[in-house]
Amino acid sequence: MTIQTIATTPFAGQRPGTSGLRKKVTEFQQPGYLENFVEAIFLTLGDCGGRTLVLGGDGRFFNREAVQIILRMAAAHGVAKVLVGRGGILSTPAVSCVIRKYSAFGGIVLSASHNPGGPDGDFGIKYNIDNGGPAPEKITEAIFAHTQTVSEYRISDAGPVDLDQLGSVRIEEMEVEVIDSVADYAEMMSRLFDFDAIRALFQRGFTMRFDGMSAVSGPYAKAIIEGMLGAPAGTVINFEPLEDFGGHHPDPNPVNAAALVALMNGADAPEFGAASDGDGDRNMIVGRSLAVSPSDSLAIIAANATLAPGYRDGIKGIARSMPTSQAADRVAQALGISCFETPTGWKYFGNLLDANLATLCGEESYGTGSNHIREKDGVWAVLFWLNLVAATGKSVNQLVEEHWARFGRNYYSRHDYEAVDAAAAESMMTDLRARLASLAGQTFGDYRVSQADDFEYTDPVDGSVSKRQGIRIIMLDGSRIVMRLSGTGTEGATVRLYLERYEADAARHALDTQEALKPLIDIAEQVSQLKQRTGRQQPSVVT
Ligand code: VG1
Ligand code: CO
């Protein structure tokens, strides 16, 4: 075994987006592409002597090859130890859990999350810091800077590690410990939730369907929900992580988890439906004929948090990404705690959680989580809802409807225009941005604009400023139109249009969401000419 120094030249475009570097698998397969990025991570980290890293991914195509390359590079950079999930598998929340539990220096997550996988699909890589969360912008920008100047990388020429065998082996001076992918995570969940009450629920014949979407949450859900909580076999479906996710798009929303939603709408629907995404950090909760809006889910979890043992003492604060609906703000107000509004992406929650300013966090994109780790967490959210059902004896639908009756309903929808022409999308945003100042005070039908701006965030803990995080058009009654470009796509640009309208009157809580938002959808089109600019008559995905 020797350590080699290989000459390389930079690749353009290795700037991490909302959640790490995501590109087509074919791009990652170019010689040196992954190596350059990993070298840039190590150059950013500096001296790794004596340090432990965590490594794992969602099992998508190229996961195993990437794990072997990263292990050999870690050994060449003097890392003392790497904890790697068996088979190279660790969900994103499990990486976060393991980093924290073993006080690791950080971790590398291999995932493109909800993006499709397989040889023609996407791959991704992300660095997480010692708090278990995504590296903040300061670090991702330093990594990017190194990718632009990297001229060589160091790698051991050792042979591959057997990733399927638990236990320790060595590469050069470095120890590689292959760990059980599920055990640490499952143990943590058993401390946060009332497993006895949930077990009793299943013993009484409670019916549930969890769709693992052939992605990474399957092994976790199967071990916990069927194994530890005693749900009957067959409760968790599509639980085996496949390299191409069975050809599906592992994104838990009513469009991509259509089979689950159809089941929940049918005559033989189980009482509770749930799904998670490619890397196990997203969740969708479904009642009978009701897919819970992720923004509502955050608010409902917050309002009922003390029913779960891990949150018995109450919550300190709530944080939501800017485009997420303001349902959680109303709960925070009722509880007398703060609600923080951050840019899109989980990395912005880290400081708030570390400083104990927020306990619960959520995003409209089917992401919910808490201070138990520093990533959003799909299985955690499902267990939280099961805990709520077990503790209250109420159905998902009852919990949602009672919440609306108490706090009012925030009608909410996101329209995605995927893979549109990047230049057209950019110029649409630029033009809209230029007109923001003149929008305030204007009237559109029943709506009057009270504020129009490009969201800017100042982190209350370290004072760092993030600009241009999405265009907001806020109406006098709190209704909102938000527009931003996605930072996770790998083709052209994806425009996300977010729409929100508040309705206090319980008699009007059963409207069709798109109908309820129609006036705002029309105003969004009027001010942006989104359809004409992108040449698309319809959004690609409506959630
Ligand atoms: C999307 C979501 C965002 C989420 C991010 C990563 O980003 O909108 O809320 O944090 O994906 O989630 P964007 O920039 O495409 O809108 V995951 O589960 O893909 O790690
Ligand atoms: Co994800």
Image: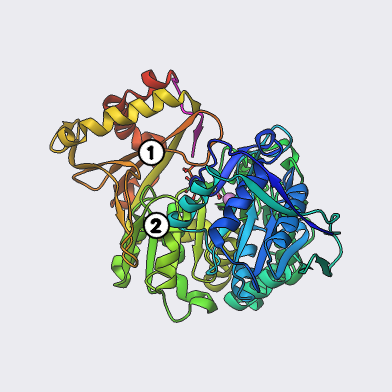
**Neighbourhood count class around disc 1 (C-alpha, 10 Å): few under 14, some 14–19, many 20 upward:** many
Q: Which mark is residue 208?
A: none
Q: Quadrant of residue 461?
A: bottom left
Q: Which mark is residue 484?
A: 1
- Report the Cα–Cα distance between label 2 and label 1: 16 Å
Residue linked to disc 2 = 320
Frontmost residue, 50 versus 57: 50
- The quadrant the N terminus occupies is bottom right
Inspect the image, locate mark 2, and give the three-letter code of the amino acid beneath it.
Arg
Tell me if residue 101 can be seen. yes
Q: Secondary structure at mark 1?
A: strand
Percent coordinates x, y for residue 326 in the rendering: 33, 54
Lower position in the chain sequence, tag 2 or tag 1: 2
Q: Is residue 205 left or right of residue 126?
A: right
Percent coordinates x, y for residue 341 in the rendering: 34, 57
| Label 2 residue near ligand 1, CB within 8 Å | no
In terms of secondary structure, what is the magenta stretch mainly? loop
Against 7, residue 174 (above or below) is below
Residue at 38% in and 51% down: 343
Tell me if residue 263 can be seen. no
Percent coordinates x, y for residue 79 in the rendering: 68, 67
| Label 1 residue near ligand 1, CB within 8 Å | yes
Q: Quadrant of residue 36?
A: top right
Against 108, residue 525 (above or below) is above
Against 130, residue 109 (above or below) is above
Frontmost residue, 229 versus 38: 38
Question: What's drawn in magenta, residue-wise?
Answer: 536-543
221 in magenta:
no
